[in-house]
Image (cartoon, grey):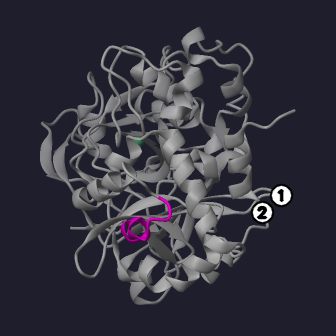
Amino acid sequence: MTIPAHESALADTLRPDLASWVESANHADTDFPIQNLPLGCFRDARQHTRPGVAIGDQILDLVELDRTGWLFAQPFSDTIARCAADGSLNALLAQGRDVLSAIRHGVSRLLRADGDHGARSRELRDRLLVPMADVEMLVPARIGDYTDFYASIHHASNVGSMFRPDNALLPNYKWVPIGYHGRASSIVPSGAAVRRPSGQTRDDASAPPQFGPTRRLDYELEVGVFIGAGNALGASIPIGQAESHVAGLCLVNDWSARDVQAWEYQPLGPFLAKNFATTVSPWIVSLDALAPFRAPAFARAEGDPAPLPYLHDERDARAGGVDITLEVLIQSLRMRREGVAPMRVSRGSFTAMYWTVAQLVTHHASNGANLQPGDLLASGTVSGAEKESRGCLLERTWRGTEPLTLPTGETRRFLEDGDEVIMRGWCEREGARRIGFGECRGTVIA
Ligand code: CA
């Protein structure tokens, strides 16, 4: 069998024995070995915004790389310049998956320890590399539209059983990838503080609602999907092509005020309980880098309906899942002051999702709605079947009835001021190099 050129090029970038001349990229526990090469956007010490590629604890500055003339020719130089001027990757993402794959392959060749390219790059390391510790990471794209899905059936069933005990999973769930339009303007980068929102709540059905700071602030662990090439208004995206519209994945914290949500969510769904802040991790990990970690789509229970034809694709059923291990840690203010390490609250896998990334993309565009470069789709809370894999406190503490105890003896039903929520994601498998997503962090302030 002849392997198509792009597949052999991809396989070349994923070889587990591939090493980089950037030493930190060769450490066993780095999230960013040469097999990953995610895209991000940063602001350096001179306040310049730049597109870049993560490699070990460094960033390859794509503007400087462009100036060497090694990788980019017109019109890509213009694209890189637009990203730098804009402080976002949109112009690059708009080039589509094949161009992003070609850039990743070119960068891989420049960064590998063997070969001429490596020798030339090594000479220019001071010019090309910026230490991650010296820059501020930005939200990687100017997000025009943000949609949040609800793709974990475990999460939907758990939350449903709390909010509607007699009607937990609504009848549309197994047919329609449920989602709602979120707010793009309040999406913040990892590390940004999140202010506790105020809102209307009604704890006592016999008394009027009250307005004040939420007392049930929560996080939601999610995976984000950045759109690369979009679709024209009125055109849809066939499921077999959906992944060609995906630039890559990131981690998302969909901060949620549960008491506000419970009072406002019917009949039109989440509104102010969700749109006050959403945190994203800074690196867009490509589906190319994730290729070794693909998994079958969710195994539907016997008796569940098959997806409608527009949401079904053989290849997607076989390998539409992505085996990303995801975890959430919490560090309270007191833990931080006493030097106590963050405590892990949950660990699960993205394979627990009922709908695949391709199904979310295809469904979103199925009515002719136009997805655009830099749009963000979030998966919905990633919760699995086990208690330890539940991706928000609402489920983890079962609406506060089973509080968590922190190492300091403090307990948590929901988040307190000063708590930092840290999300991590990584992929590992026999025969492949481990890759990671970096962190998605946020601290609650009063
Ligand atoms: Ca959510």
Quarter containing the C terminus: bottom left
Mark 2 vs 1, N-terminal side: 2
Kindly state the secondary structure of the residue where label 2 is placed. Answer: loop
The answer to whether residue 348 is above or below residue 151 is below
Task: State yes or no: Cβ of the residue under disc 1 lies below 8 Å from any atom of ligand 1.
Answer: no
Q: For ligand 1, which image quadrant applies?
A: top left
The three-letter code of the residue at mark 2 reads Pro
The three-letter code of the residue at mark 1 reads Gly
- The circle on residue 409 is none
Quarter containing the N terminus: top right
In the image: residue 285, left or right of residue 113:
left
**Residue 215 placement: quadrant:** bottom left
Look at 36% across and 79% down and name the residue there. 333
Residue 282: tell me if it is visible.
no
Contact, mark 2 vs mark 1 (Cβ under 8 Å):
yes
Picture coordinates of residue 314 (x, y %)?
Answer: 71, 20
Front label number (2 vs 1): 2
The answer to whether residue 386 is above or below residue 317 is below
- Furthest-right residue in this view: 1
**Residue 307 placement: quadrant:** top right
Residue 206: tell me if it is visible.
yes
Q: What stretch is highlighted in magenta?
A: 62-71
Look at 39% across and 28% down and name the residue there. 179
